[in-house]
Image: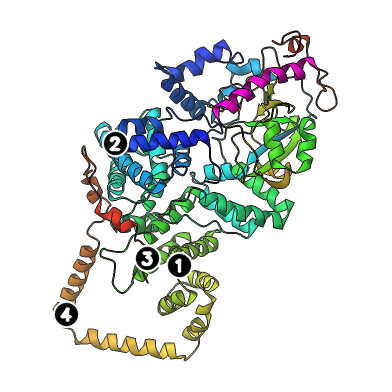
């Protein structure tokens, strides 16, 4: 498994879901099921049926030394969110809200029409309509979609805003994808971003492969390292620390959205086995650069790395 | 698809091999999340398969082949469900949900359509809690969505109208209910015309459209979202059958006068050309009123000329005709006795030929 998954978690809810695994395909099937049935649950830790990342078996991944005023950024895909919502009971209300805010109606795919990009093309028009109406309209939609996503939304992934400030203000979505390792986003998709303080979403957690589901673009952070770490999509690009937390909801989700929609430009995504393998091996160099080099603490400098973290699994000289 | 993905391309080749070998077991495994590429983003199996389908060079024939195999899977699951009548495991629920989502993406085929209707009848025998778990909510939305896209005949007409009307006790007004209403409305509109295609190009059944619209208007009346839902329904109607504004105005003009005000208002928003007629129909002493008065007089004279026993016989005949017209109604006992025709082979489908010619003409 992953060194970040505790023994208690392995022998607890995970073993329960992985019972019956005999071969590799069983593993993938059961892992997917674990994600859907143990991670895609409420992020309200007061509930018995809360998401597995909030349970006591994952306490070892809770991050406690980050001040509440530290700022985080979460990037979500409008396209992915709406495709997901199109399978839910909320779909009629979502369409109505989008129409009110953007002035554009989402038309149904007619029967018999095979068109893989139907919804994406409709969303282009909606996104442009929202853009024309301004940031407040985008924020209202962001808040509405966050609420509509409901209790089965998995935790949000976020990085520290200081570490991507330049990319965030540059207004290029491809830059965000590269920095944050969003290799599963596709050119043409529309991204939304939220920027907020840690205290809005506490507690925050170090991610594991279980929350990453089956993403080939997630790389475990090394033992002893407090945070997750992004796998940038370009060799030599700077990695960011990343964390997990509950999704924003209600007015907060609207107010803390940046109010901008960015369309992912056409850029080369490392999506074949060879490119991915190269990217993954380059992570070792990134660990060394980030953990042994002169690392700038995010934000005010209040966060520092412990001796343990700086010694984490790197050779004495960079590869 | 906008973006070609090597992993999806490989999966699309696998799907073609699955279809060529008629390998139902392998498709079942894929739908359960086995042997799928690691794309990230928490995508369900059906979505990964959908994306791979569109990477294929011959997406249409691959989709038809997948629909035939999927029909067998849905059929087998319906039979299991009927026999078991107990809680389904998580793997099976996931398989079914992904099968339904995939079915909604594929072109309509009679075998898959029949299998889904069989599944619907099996689901209706489940206890409410079981049904809730299996169908991802109280309304079985994924199943109705799949059925709306997989229609090859008019057998679901009564079911769509039932959904639009709701129960006599009324339905809880929830987002799920609103979504279901629009699915039912689309389902009603997407009923293919009878075979052979009507020679006079009567693809749009205005009687059916009007019945559905009136039911929908009654279902939404008094709710905050009513106006938006009615307008959306009329725009779905307009999108479903691409016709000129004059076509709609000409065909709706004789009907709109008897519609409730909320529905009429929305129709006037969508087809402003209906305005002039509407004003005269409701003005005092207009031609339309005179025409209506004349028709009423003629009907009263006709009724007065009938002897009592003739009237009863005429009514019975009309009722029988109505029952005959809706013979393949899929509700209640008709659903309960429905069985899946698929055993070990998939028959070439007659309706699959007609599905490609749907909504043409006129």
Secondary structure, mark 4, is helix
Q: Note whether residue A133 is visible.
A: yes
Of residue B192 and residue B97, the one placed in the foreground of this image is B192
The numbered mark, 1 or 4, whose residue comes first in the sequence reads: 1
Please state the horizontal and vertical placement of residue A193, each as a whole percent of the image. 70, 40
Q: CA distance from mark 1 to mark 4?
A: 47 Å
Camera-side residue of A53 and B14: B14
User: Quadrant of residue B247 in the image?
Assistant: bottom left
> Which label belongs to residue B308?
4
Q: Is residue A78 magenta?
A: no
CB atoms at circles 3 and 2 under 8 Å apart? no
Q: Chain of mark 1?
A: B
The label nearer to you, 1 versus 4, is 1
Q: Is residue B43 above or below residue A133?
A: above
Residue to which mark 1 is pinned: B242
Mark before the other along the chain sequence, 1 or 2: 2
Give whichever of discs 4 and 3 has the lower sequence position. 4
Separation of disc 4 and disc 2 at Cα? 63 Å
């Amino acid at each position: 498994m992953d060194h970040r998954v505790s023994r208690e978690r392995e022998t607890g809810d995970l073993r329960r879901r992985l019972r019956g695994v005999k071969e590799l395909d069983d593993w993938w099937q059961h892992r997917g099921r674990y994600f859907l049935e143990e991670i895609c649950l409420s992020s309200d830790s007061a509930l018995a049926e809360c998401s597995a990342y909030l349970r006591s078996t994952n306490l070892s991944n809770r991050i406690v030394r980050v001040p509440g005023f530290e700022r985080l950024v979460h990037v979500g895909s409008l396209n992915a969110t709406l495709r997901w919502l199109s399978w839910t009971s909320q779909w009629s209300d979502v369409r109505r809200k989008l129409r009110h805010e953007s002035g554009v109606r989402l038309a149904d795919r007619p029967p018999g029409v095979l068109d893989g990009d139907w919804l994406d093309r409709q969303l282009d028009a909606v996104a442009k309509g929202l853009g024309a109406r301004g940031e407040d309209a985008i924020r209202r939609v962001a808040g509405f979609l966050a609420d509509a996503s409901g209790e089965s939304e998995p935790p949000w992934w976020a990085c520290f805003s200081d570490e991507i400030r330049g990319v965030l203000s540059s207004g290029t979505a491809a830059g965000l994808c590269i920095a944050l390792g969003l290799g599963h986003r596709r050119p043409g998709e529309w991204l939304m971003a939220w920027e907020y303080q840690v205290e809005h979403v506490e507690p925050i957690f170090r991610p594991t492969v279980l929350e990453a589901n089956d993403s080939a673009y997630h790389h475990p952070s090394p033992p002893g390292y407090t945070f997750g770490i992004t796998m940038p999509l370009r060799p030599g690009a700077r990695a960011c620390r990343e964390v997990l937390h509950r999704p924003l909801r209600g007015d907060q989700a609207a107010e803390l959205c940046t109010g901008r929609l960015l369309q992912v430009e056409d850029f080369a995504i490392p999506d074949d086995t060879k490119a991915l393998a190269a990217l993954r091996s380059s992570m070792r160099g990134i660990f060394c650069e980030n953990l042994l080099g002169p690392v700038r603490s995010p934000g005010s400098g209040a966060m520092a790395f412990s001796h343990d973290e700086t010694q984490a699994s790197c050779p004495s000289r960079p590869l | 698809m906008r973006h070609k993905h090597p992993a999806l391309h490989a999966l699309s080749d696998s799907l073609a091999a699955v279809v060529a070998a008629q390998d139902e077991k392998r498709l079942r495994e894929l739908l359960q999340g086995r042997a799928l590429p690691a794309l990230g983003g928490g995508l369900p199996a059906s979505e990964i398969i959908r994306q791979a389908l569109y990477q294929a060079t011959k997406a249409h024939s691959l989709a038809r082949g997948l629909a035939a195999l999927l029909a067998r899977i849905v059929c087998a699951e319906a039979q299991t469900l009927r026999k078991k009548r107990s809680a389904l495991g998580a793997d099976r629920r996931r398989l079914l949900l992904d099968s339904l989502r995939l079915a909604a993406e594929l072109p309509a085929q009679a075998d898959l359509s029949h299998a889904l209707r069989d599944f619907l009848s099996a689901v209706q025998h489940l206890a409410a809690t079981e049904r809730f778990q299996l169908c991802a909510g109280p309304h079985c939305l994924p199943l109705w969505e799949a059925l709306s896209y997989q229609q090859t005949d008019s057998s679901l007409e009564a079911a769509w109208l039932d959904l639009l009307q709701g129960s006599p006790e009324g339905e809880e007004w929830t987002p799920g209910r609103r979504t279901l209403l629009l699915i039912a409305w689309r389902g009603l509109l997407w009923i293919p015309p009878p075979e052979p295609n009507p020679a006079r190009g009567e693809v749009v059944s205005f009687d059916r459209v009007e019945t559905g619209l009136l039911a929908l208007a009654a279902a939404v009346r008094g709710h905050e979202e009513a106006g938006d839902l009615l307008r959306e329904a009329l725009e779905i109607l307009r999108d479903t059958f691409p016709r000129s504004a004059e076509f709609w105005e000409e065909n709706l003009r004789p009907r709109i006068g008897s519609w409730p005000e909320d529905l009429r208002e929305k129709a006037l928003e969508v087809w402003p050309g209906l305005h002039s007629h509407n004003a005269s129909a409701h003005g005092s002493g207009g031609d339309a009123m005179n025409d209506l008065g004349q028709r009423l007089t003629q009907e009263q004279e006709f009724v007065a000329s009938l002897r009592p026993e003739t009237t009863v016989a005429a009514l019975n005949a009309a009722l029988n005709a109505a029952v005959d017209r809706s013979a393949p109604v899929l509700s209640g006992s008709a659903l309960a006795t429905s069985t899946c025709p698929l055993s070990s082979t998939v028959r070439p489908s007659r309706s699959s030929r007609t599905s490609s010619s749907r909504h043409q003409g006129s």
